Amino acid sequence: MNDGQGAPTADRTTARDPSRFEDRFAARATGIKSSAMRDLMSLTERPEIISLAGGLPDTDCFPDEIFCEVWEAVATKYKASSLQYGPTEGLLELRQYICEIMRSEGAIAQPDEILVTAGGQQAIALAIGAFIDPGDIVIAEGPTYPGAVPTLTTNQAQVIHIPLDANGMSIDSLEEHLDRLDSQGRQPKLIYTIPNFHNPGGVTMSLERRHQLVALAAERDILIVEDNPYGAIRFEGDALPSLYELDAGAGGVVYLSTFSKILSPGVRIGWVAAPALILRKMNLGKQAIDLCSSTLGQRFIIEYLRRHDWRQHVGRLNIIYSSRRDAMLAALSNEFPAEATWSHPRGGLFVWATLPEYLQTSELLARAIDRHQVAFVPGGAAFLDGQGQHSMRLNFSSSSEEKITEGVHRIGAAIEAMTALQRAFGGGV
Amino acid sequence: MSSPQRVAVLKGGQSLEREVSLRSAANVEAALRRLGHQVISVDADSSLVRTLRTERPDVVFVAIHGKGGEDGTVQEILEILNIPYTGSGVLACVRSMDKVVTKAIFTDAGIPTPPACAFGEDAFRELGAADALGEVQLRLGLPLVVKPAKQGSAIGITIARSPEDVPRGIMSALSYDNHVMLEQFIPGREIAVSVIGTADPVALPAVEAVFSGDFYDFESRYTPGMTELVAPADLSDALAAEVSRVALQCYQVMGFRGFGRIDMIIDADDQVWVLEINPIPGMTDTSLLPKAAQAAGLSFDDVIERVLGEAALGI
């Protein structure tokens, strides 16, 4: 805490002008605005707050002895080489394992079609960065992944949100938008979609829509960026083929995934599978950012996969998460008003709930944190156009069932307080 | 330069302005280090008293905005622990944190402030105060500024332009505090006058915030480049003298010490209206006080040194 800096540094400038950078920021940086909501979210880390806001997997489930065993193997087998830079595209052995993982899910990729990234977030940033110039149109679900919002904003994309329903992105609505754009002589650069256990929507795209989307995108010659961090976090139902698989090597889909949800977000390892021509551009983009992903992180995953079956670990996670999901759905039924609706995810980490229109979830969050010690992500964070004001994202993977039940109860109390106010104003409650 | 001291910078806290406080404190800490002081950075949490006892600072620089920092809470703790601190004492903080109390004090002192009324959340839920909104609008007119009674950085403020906007604005304001103030909207120029000093306080040049939106909201305040801060504000000599006079009167009537910032509106008839007074002015890169100091030929470090030099005890 004490910085121990007793030595004067007065020889450095004392004529400090805090506003001196104001005119120098790049246009893409000025798109990033301060927001009371972002500041508010920082309060969710207070220990007394039950936070259903994060998107954290439960790393407590990772067995201690396996963690130690794998690190020991990395230390003894690779020594200094694990401390060294690696190739930008990632270690070959890891890319081979990634191809195996994808194959087990039905998708065929070769190691030279894989780029290892610093988590799925970098995969998104590289994909957007490779294709989007300021003003380019991106199609995304509405809501879309809140973490993609700043990436799209800083790349100055013009985002069109396509509504989600229980079967995923509405292909009819997508087609209408594409026709409208076409009549204006415009075309989106890409379609960003999360088909499995959508974050934050909680829904999964049906097989029929997957076929429709791949066919429509091919017909209109629009690239699909398929983000699949949650595909393996499945509690019920059969796995559906990825868009990448349905595209069958036609080059119409860039596929993104990550080890964050199936093993650990702390190792920061994700990947892109894409045609070599696209991958080369993204490889250059990655070189400019960080040269290569963590060699230590890659070695950890390689050694883990060599010794253990990741599906067993995910199987354990899924049992835990599915009970937590059940606890959340039960609590929502007990605590939320009758007019509220919410998704019933069959996997993933999130429930998306929508409240009556007189409740703004950004305001509800301020009240919830300050007076009820509970937090969630307000729905506006998942849109770039101001929608989502009455919705919220609730995470069930990182809290115990008891905390989830209590957390939803507290949100229910905050909703009740606001509803009572609305009633006082004679509102339609 | 004063002799080097061990300065604990209190920052963060649990208010909605926590992040703003961290940005202010980062600048304050950097300045204190440049000035040769030893900085102890303290994020105020439940171990605050224990931390202060262990670290035994010579003086505390309070850089917490909003609840906890500007409402007299940490000042009361520092009084008990007998550690001199920067800025105003407990009473001045308590009075300025609540906009309802501030307004009453200003009105008593003959300081022009827009007429307003205020209600607690219970008044709406239990006493039917919503039925009196028609009278409120008759008395104060429209538009109305609807704001939480105890909240800074323009958080939770709505400009209600039609009767239908008023309940919505109240719902919003009551999300941030359990009291809401409904204040007559005075269109005009947004002016802030910062004051430093205790025995002989000095008003720094007025700063005008020129922004594109409806009002000087959170986004405009803290996004670099979104608001142009004109310092000194383009005012006639007479008006510049008037805003300084009013600011000093506010500062003194509230019993402020060290530093403070008075936010005002100058309407089309050059009438000055005081909106509020802040005992811990923002020290972020986009804040008003640093800009005012610069216009006065004072560096940021000069201000910090002066404020530190005024640190004291006393309710």
Image (spheres, coloured by chain):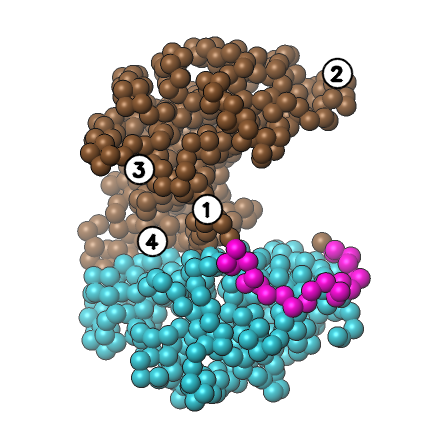
Q: Is residue A284 left or right of residue A30?
A: right
Instruction: Using a 10 Å C-alpha cutoff, classify the residue at mark 1 as few (fewer than 14 neighbours), some (14 to 19) or many (20 or more).
Output: few
> Can residue B91 be seen at all in this image of the molecule?
no
Residue on which disc 2 sits: A77
* Cα–Cα gap, marks 2 and 1: 44 Å
- Residue at far front of view: A185
Q: Are discs 3 and 4 located on one and the same chain?
A: yes
Q: Is residue A265 left or right of residue A167?
A: right
Residue B135 percent location from the top left of the image: 21, 74
Q: Are discs 2 and 1 located on one and the same chain?
A: yes
Q: Are discs 3 and 2 located on one and the same chain?
A: yes
* Cα–Cα gap, marks 3 and 1: 19 Å
Instruction: Using a 10 Å C-alpha cutoff, classify the residue at mark 3 as few (fewer than 14 neighbours), some (14 to 19) or many (20 or more).
Output: some
> For this rendering, which residue is in front, B110 or B239?
B239
Instruction: Evaluate if marks 3 and 2 touch, with contact meaning CB atoms under 8 Å apart.
Output: no
Residue on which disc 3 sits: A160
- Protein chain holding label 2: A
**Which chain is painted in cyan?**
B
Nearer mark to the viewer, of 3 and 1 = 1
Q: Quadrant of the N terminus of chain A?
A: bottom right
Identify residue type, mark 2: Lys
> For this rendering, which residue is in front, B197 or B206?
B206
Q: Helix or strand or loop: what does disc 3 sit on?
A: strand
* Cα–Cα gap, marks 4 and 1: 40 Å
Q: Residue at x 25, y 40 (%)?
A: A338
Query: On the image, which quarter does residue A376 sit in?
Result: top left
- In this picture, is A159 found above or below B61? above
**Which chain is painted in brown?**
A
Residue A28 is labelled as 1
Instruction: Evaluate if marks 3 and 4 touch, with contact meaning CB atoms under 8 Å apart.
Output: no
Q: Residue at x 43, y 89 (%)?
A: B238
